[in-house]
Image (cartoon, coloured by chain):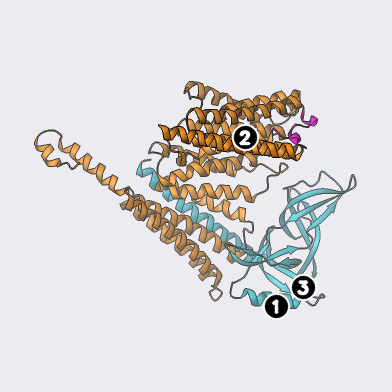
Chain colours: A cyan, B orange
Amino acid sequence: MKSGWKWILFTGVVLFQWYMLGSWIYREERTISSGVFIKIPCQQVDPKDPFRGTYFNINPIPAQFEYTDSLRFTRGQTVWINYEKDSGDVYTFYSVQPDSETPEMPVYIQSQIKFTFPVYPDSVYSATLEYPFSNLYVNEKAAPDLLEQYNKALSDTTIKVYAGLHVLNGKASLEGLWIGNRRLE
Amino acid sequence: MKIDLRELIAHGLIDEGTAQRIQQFYKNKSRDSGSSRFMLILSLIGIVLVGLGLILIVAYNWDQFSKWVKIGISFIPLLFSQALGVFVLRKKSNESLWAESVALSILFSVGIAISLLSQIYNIEAEISGFIKWWIILTMAIPFIFDSRSVSLALWVGIGWYLTSISWNMDQAYDFFPLVIILVLMVWYVLQWRKGMQHHLLILHHWTIPIVLTIFLFFNSSLLCERFVVVACLITFIGFGALAFGPFSEQKFLSNGYRTAQFLGIWITGMLMTFDFFWTDSIAGNILVCLTSGNPLLPAIFLIALGLLIWYHFKQRIPPEPDHMIWLGLALILVLFIGEIHPATGQFLSNLFILAAAAKLIYDGVTGENLIVVNLGLLALTVWILAWFFGHDFSFIWKGLLFIALGLLCFGINWMIIKKQKRI
């Protein structure tokens, strides 16, 4: 390859790298600044990632939903998860619908169907949801303290856990984890 | 031999241009010398360690910074390595040590930027998504810097990606691995013209057959269950064509395709000797696959098989030392015969596996090659072990056969060593 082509390719690669990484920042910042802030109920565990540090695994409720029309949802399909306002900034699950339809509620998150399977053959089907956010990263130094706070809070079974999100046009940006009214930080 | 170039020019034996070319040749040769290679290896290890160290230290301990400072820090290594890239392209483009170092540093700085951004915004939770974007953003680096180390890292990355995603058939086909493999393969084949012996390229000769085998299984959802076995055998025959075609002059350790084709065909053949492989329900499966399923991929494999057979005859590749290509072709035939009569298929599989092991032992004995003899004996032992544990024989028979096999190993090895000493 002649060196002129290398220069063109290198310039293209550099621009592409900055464009892609920059577009992630733009997308997230736009969602954070213009989106609605909501808190949705969830369950969680605490694994680790070799590259990106300690994180809480966010498991929003519901993990799956039931439906009757077997042709309505398929594996890998993009869907809207609709939420209705509960109290304050807490929102609860309302419905799931294919992304080809207009969302039923003003607050909705774009997600995917992970699996579908029959619960009672020929009558009810179940589908598991793959939410676009699943990890909340925390600082290594702060992690033990956060885990302690988290475990202490969970000893009271009446306290609910919420994931705080900014939502804009179906895109969601994870802000943090709340135990009851207190943010974990 | 020391040559005084000025003397040769003075006597009119060579002209000034030839003298310059000779000087340039020895200059380039010294760059590829042992100490230069050692420097290259040390530099590459150093960059890998520094890259990983930066990811670990910065990402885990930056709680006190604001978000925008964190984003700035994420981009500093990328900016620095890209600036270094400009310098290398301008001033050091012919020096492999510089080119490899800067290419690796760009690779890691992109990895650092993705890691840190995904941590800051809690995005790209799945490791497969992380690897995918890392590969997409760096796949042109081997072409720009002629970097074997980044190409190798990308091959490893694609293998990692393939093992971290689901291979289910009811999802849309993921074209990403196919595209990346094709792109990287172009670069790899272009490198052959420069020689196949570079140490980092030798690692490619081992990594690529492994990744391609994983890729084959990734695509298995596009093939019927039974045709996957045919596709495996065709792929391994393809490795054989490479091993004994373009790579025929390579030493054993520089020719991963040879080991891949041997192990691949042998393991597939061994699986074909078991009872579970030949249940009556499989009859007609391949035919149904070819007529009712998606015919594109099976057609591609069958055309590839035709081309491979043509290549073998055209290149007049002699029956190679381990005969695996011929065993592979025989096993494909057996699979089609087994479609009509599974019991015959199983019988023929056993027969061919046994014949291949016997031929290896025979060739080893006649050629007084201990490696080939022991390879044949090992193949025979594995076949017997598998066969005996799959069938109900009395322990007396099992014991006697193992003793016979042990004596055969001792006897043949002793005979060859004695013959070699006599010579």
Specify start and end residues of the magenta stretch as a single range. B272-282
Mark 1 / mark 3, whichever is N-terminal? 3
> Residue placed at 45% from the left, 37% from the top?
B189
What's the CA distance linking mark 1 and mark 3?
24 Å
| Residue at image mark 3 | A88
Few, some or many residues within 10 Å of mark 1 (<14, 14–19, 20+)? some
Q: Are both tags, 2 and 3, on one chain?
A: no
Lateral position of residue B81 relative to residue A35, left or right: left
Which one is nearer the viewer's eye here, B292 or B246?
B246
Residue B402, image x and y in percent?
Answer: 66, 39
Q: Is residue A148 magenta?
A: no
Q: Is residue B280 magenta?
A: yes
Residue B86, image x and y in percent?
Answer: 37, 54
Q: Are marks 2 and 1 in contact (CB under 8 Å)?
A: no
In the displayed structure, would residue A40 be above or below residue B250?
below
Q: Are both tags, 2 and 1, on one chain?
A: no
